[in-house]
Image (cartoon, grey):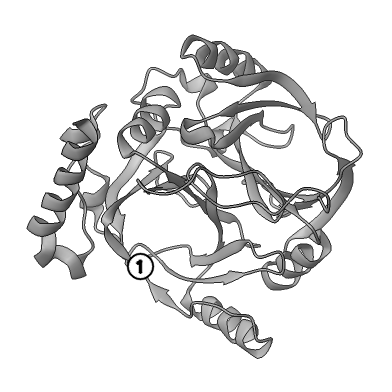
Amino acid sequence: MNARIHHISILNRFIQPTFDFYHNILGLKLLMKTINQDDHTMYHLFFSDNQERIGTELTFFEVREGEDHKFGTNNIERVVMKVPSEESLTFWEARLEAAGICHYGIETFNGRPLLRFEAPDDTQISLTPLREFEKADDFYPFADTDVPVEHAILGIDAIQLRGQYPAATEKELTNLLGWHQQKQTTFFDTNTEVTILDNQETTFYQEVHLIHDIHSPLAELGIGGIHHVAFGVKDEKRLRELDEQLNQRNFLNSGIKHREFFTSLYFREPNRMLIEIATEEGSLDPSAYENQSRFFEEIPLYLPHFLAGERESIEQILENQQHDHDA
């Protein structure tokens, strides 16, 4: 199997509206309510399908201070999620409209229908239906929601990357991770060129859209922006092989990070977008999946084992931050 998109991580300002939107409006399962392992004062939420599979995970860091994200090139621009059918797009158009969510109606991109909308903090999300060769039975959407299962969000379909030198990004994704150039197209009704890569899978097909943009200013990552996209590899052995390849080519990278949930490394590809490579499996305690609720405050905080002794102080900091926001 080639490297599937593992997860996508986004910066949001306040965790409560993030939870309300992705869990209660989009109907995604809250896989885990935890903290950023590099900053213990920061919430980190994981959403997934009903089987906690890679390729279905969106994660969110709560970053209370800082500027809003500014559009530009050299930017991870938009997440595209799968839904079962074109009829599902009509359902979501009406649901987003009823919730007062800014959307752009059902459009056509790359010959396929697409519904673009703006999530909290103007994060750019889209929905697109399964292709003819994909089967809804291969997916496991969260069922304990008011979203009908026949229209439920199924997983990550694509990530859109806007860059000055997309051929350089393509080289890394094809040589390191086994992606394949499928075709060239244009960005909606503009002359902007887009290269479509795919992972050559049939049961969990995904794409990367490389948008060629030498005219826009450089993006400034901020609140609402996509922090990084992660690609999955089978195990730590393969991860260490890729780490060695990056080191041999003098790519600045994080080295191997053990996250308990999985093992990963981070590097910046030639257009300076942050890429994570993560193993398919980790050693996550099954208790992290428990206690689903529509109410954020009812869900216990999961801490990795190495932070178990700091629970009281971490929870107090998070509680004080929430009180400051509410005040």
Nearest the viewer among 115 and 211 is 211
**Residue 267 percent across, percent down from the top left:** 57, 71
Q: Residue at x 39, y 38 (%)?
A: 50
| Residue displayed at 52% across by 82% down | 240
Instruction: Count the marks.
Output: 1
Residue 29 shown left or right of residue 108 in the figure: left
**Viewer-proximal residue, 256 or 78?**
78
The x, y position of residue 173, in whole percent, is: 71, 65
Q: Is residue 130 left or right of residue 284?
A: right
Viewer-proximal residue among 234 and 193: 193
Residue corresponding to mark 1:
259
Residue 65 in percent (x, y) is at: 37, 48
Above or below residue 186? Residue 41 is below
Q: Residue furthest right?
A: 191
Q: Which of the 4 quarters of the picture holds residue 36?
A: bottom left
Q: Is residue 39 left or right of residue 290?
A: right
Q: Amino acid at mark 1?
A: Arg
Tell me if residue 289 comes above or below residue 149 in the rendering. below
Q: Between 202 and 111, which is closer to the camera in this rendering?
A: 111
Q: Quadrant of the C terminus?
A: top left
Q: Position of residue 181 (x, y in %)?
A: 83, 56
Give residue 164's quadrant in the image.
bottom right
Please tell me in which quadrant of the rendered image residue 177 appears.
bottom right
Residue at the spot 63% in from the left edge and 34% down from the top edge: 135
User: Which residue is pictured at 24% across the width and 36% down the height?
Assistant: 325
Q: Residues within 10 Å of mark 1 (few under 14, many from 20)?
A: some
Regarding mark 1 in the picture, which secondary structure is present there? loop
